[in-house]
Amino acid sequence: MSLASGTDLDVAQPPVTHQITRLVLARHAQPTEDARGRCYGALDVGLSAAGRRQARLLAATLARTPLAALYSSPSRRARDTAAPVAETHGLEPIIDERLSEIDFGDFEGRRYEELEQAYPELFQQWMTTPTRVQFPGGESYRDLRVRALEALETIRRRHAGQITAIVSHGGVLRAILTACLEMPIEASFRLDQSHGAISIIDWVDAVPIVRVVNAQPSTVASARQGLLPLLADAQSATKATP
């Protein structure tokens, strides 16, 4: 049949359905009081009583979300936050060293006022341009970003078309979010990441869409539907005719 007749163009085309991969990011819950005012990254600290409540609320919020896997930083504060989520879903958390918080090296465990006196120039650089600092005996933020994005790519490819959760740290989650948003690394700390808060990223095929940033579990929970936005809504929004 001739294309010029227009008949071929009138044939209805099937909708194109894209694969959706969802990643739920959660920062660890509030750490113990003795960590307050101290520099802690690699330093292993547990959760406060408030932090344990935050972890339980996180688990309740994600209870209706069909998680295929749960990943965690090896730190105790992250593992203790992930534990109630894992129990709710019958999952064993997968520990990934690349999801660890930045290693502050010689700064670990020391009070901020002490560091300001001992390293005035480096401390000032840290406070003004944190992504450019190389911590003595430790890492730089760029080091963290490289390993965090490697972990992200591994998890995304391993669980394509599924919903996965990560419990990690503010530095790691900022690195992931800024990469997905194509923000400059220097803008990383303009993104707030509160203890126990949730961010959500959907990949439509290979394209990331950041749907939620730094939401407290109580504000994204629904007794009827669980975590919002629904993955089904994301899937229907990506259907289009060619």
Image (cartoon, helix red, strand yellow):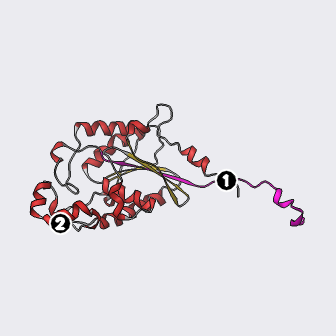
Q: Position of residue 200 (x, y in %)?
A: 45, 49
Vertical placement of 189 versus 60: above or below?
Answer: below
Mark 1, residues whose alpha carbon is within 10 Å: few (<14), some, or many (≥20)?
few
- Amino acid type, mark 1: Ala
- Amino acid type, mark 2: Leu
Q: Which residues are magenta?
A: 1-28
**Could you say which is closer to the camera, residue 168 or residue 190?**
190
Residue at the far top: name it. 223
Mark 2, residues whose alpha carbon is within 10 Å: few (<14), some, or many (≥20)?
some
User: Is 211 situated left or right of 143 in this image?
Assistant: right
Vertical placement of 91 versus 141: above or below?
Answer: above
Q: Quadrant of residue 126?
A: bottom left
Observer able to see residue 103: no
Which residue has dot 2 on it? 122
**Could you say which is closer to the camera, residue 33 or residue 162?**
33
Q: Position of residue 180 (x, y in %)?
A: 45, 59
Residue displayed at 17% across by 66% down: 122
> Given this view, does label 2 or label 1 mark the residue nearer the observer?
2
User: Is 157 situated left or right of 27 in this image?
Assistant: right
At mark 2, the secondary structure is: helix
Observer able to see residue 89: yes
User: Is 163 situated left or right of 242 in this image?
Assistant: left
Residue displayed at 26% across by 62% down: 130
User: Which numbered dot is residue 240?
Assistant: 1
**Image quadrant where one finds the N terminus:** bottom right
**Distance between the Cα atoms at labels 2 and 1?**
53 Å
At mark 1, the secondary structure is: loop
Residue displayed at 87% across by 59% down: 7
Q: Position of residue 231 (x, y in %)?
A: 53, 45
Vertical placement of 55 versus 148: above or below?
Answer: above
CB of mark 2 within 8 Å of CB of mark 1? no
Q: Is residue 65 magenta?
A: no
